[in-house]
Amino acid sequence: QVQLVESGGGLVQAGGSLRLSCAVSGRISNSYAMGWFRQAPGKEREFVAALTWSRIITYNTDYVDSVKGRFTISRDNAGTKVYLQMNSLKPEDTALYYCAAGPKSGSRVGHEYTYWGRGTQVTVSS
């Protein structure tokens, strides 16, 4: 029933921007963390950003150090879409980006997430 679908990936030159979207459908607790992970060829899956919220409208964000100041995670008012705005992209950002949802608030660990999208490819040329 739960489905996450990423979109917005593509090819961009270094210094450019992309906005990834994650459409969320199905029944997911409003206390779940929403996160973005990425995996480059020959490398392990890496945490990128997370968004946590509950019944209270206030939410928190978390980012891996390498993307702080460049990437922004956000959500729409209904919580049915999660975004990752990526600015000042670098070649090392090239990876398959995954949207994920999990029960542990603020988790940066991939295996603690329950639901995953199929990924969207981001390629940054030098």
Image (cartoon, helix red, strand yellow):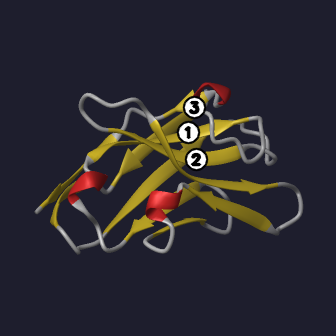
Query: For the residue marked with disc 1, what is the amino acid?
Result: Ala
Q: Are marks 3 and 1 in contact (CB under 8 Å)?
A: yes
Along the line of sight, the residue nearer the viewer: 109 or 84: 109
- Image location (x, y in percent) of residue 88: 31, 74
Furthest toward the left, the residue is 126
Instruction: Tell me if residue 67 can be seen.
Output: yes
Query: For the residue marked with disc 3, what is the amino acid?
Result: Gly
Query: For the residue marked with disc 2, what is the amino acid?
Result: Gly
Left or right placement of residue 35 versus residue 54 in this view: left
- Image location (x, y in percent) of residue 106: 73, 48
- Image location (x, y in percent) of residue 16: 23, 73
Q: Quadrant of residue 74?
A: bottom right
Q: Nearer the viewer, mark 3 or mark 1?
A: 3
Label 2 vs 3, first from the N-terminus: 2
Measure the C-alpha gap from mark 2 to mark 3.
9 Å
Q: Are marks 1 and 2 in contact (CB under 8 Å)?
A: yes
Q: Which residue is mark 2?
A: 35
Label 1 vs 2, first from the N-terminus: 2
- Image location (x, y in percent) of residue 9: 27, 53
Residue sitting at 32 percent across and 31 percent down? Answer: 43
- Mark 3 lies on a secondary structure that is helix
Tell me: residue 72, above or below residue 41.
Answer: below
Furthest toward the right, the residue is 56
Mark 2 neighbour class, 10 Å CA radius: few under 14, some 14 to 19, many 20 or more: many
Along the line of sight, the residue nearer the viewer: 27 or 75: 75
Q: Which residue is mark 1?
A: 100
Q: Which residue is mark 3?
A: 110
